[in-house]
Amino acid sequence: MFAVLLLAVRLACAHALRKIGQASALFTAAVIFGLIGFIGFAAALWIWLAHMLGPIAAALLIGVAGVLLAAIFGAIGRAKLRTASPLQSPAARALMAEIKANGSTLEVWGPAIGTAVLSFILGGKPKQ
């Protein structure tokens, strides 16, 4: 019985990893082709601006715009990193204190692990 359960969990994990790998490969390809497209647009913009302003001014304008965008995205990323984790909230700390006070974590993690295993085994069928 345990061998069948273990096989089912392994098959579910293999299927999930395969889906994650395929999605990662597709997203990587999308990013690569997006960068190629962005470089093409930047080259076209530089050529157009070079006819309008001259090559040096066009390069400087594109460089300043790139640095400005990088600074904006860096500031947004830095703000996202500094947000508090949900695990540091007062509610999460109270829950952890209650779990530690009960002494038995098996009562908490047992149903969670059982539910996770059952969801892998009895999970929905893949879309056709």
Image (tube, helix red, strand yellow):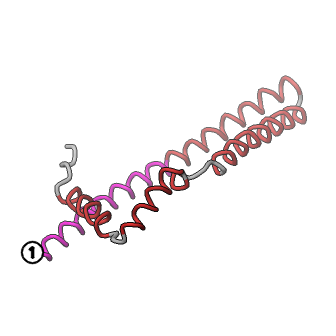
Magenta stretch prevailing secondary structure: helix
Q: Horizontally, is 79 left or right of 4 in the view?
A: right
* Percent position of residue 80, x then y: 63, 46
Identify which residue is drawn at 19% across, 43% down: 128
The relative height of residue 19 versus residue 64 in the rendered view (above or below) is below
Q: Horizontally, is 16 left or right of 5 in the view?
A: right
Q: Which residues are magenta?
A: 1-29
The relative height of residue 72 versus residue 100 in the rendered view (above or below) is above
Which image quadrant for residue 107? bottom left
- Residue beneath disc 1: 1
* Percent position of residue 38, x then y: 64, 38
Judging depth in this view, the residue of 33 and 47 nearest the camera is 33
Which image quadrant for residue 99? bottom left
Q: Residue furthest left?
A: 1
Judging depth in this view, the residue of 79 and 94 nearest the camera is 94
Identify which residue is drawn at 43% across, 56% down: 95
Please name the amino acid that badge 1 sits on: Met
Identify which residue is drawn at 56% across, 48% down: 32
Identify which residue is drawn at 83% across, 25% down: 51
Figure label count: 1
Q: Residue furthest top?
A: 52
The relative height of residue 110 versus residue 20 in the rendered view (above or below) is below
Task: Please tell me whether mark 1 sits on a helix, a strand or a loop.
Answer: loop
Q: Counting other residues with Cα less than 10 Å from the Cα at mark 1, is it few (<14), some (14-19), or many (20 or more)?
A: few
Viewport quadrant of the N terminus:
bottom left
* Percent position of residue 104, x then y: 33, 71
Magenta residue check for 37: no
* Percent position of residue 112, x then y: 29, 60
Judging depth in this view, the residue of 62 and 92 nearest the camera is 92
Which image quadrant for residue 115? bottom left
Magenta residue check for 25: yes
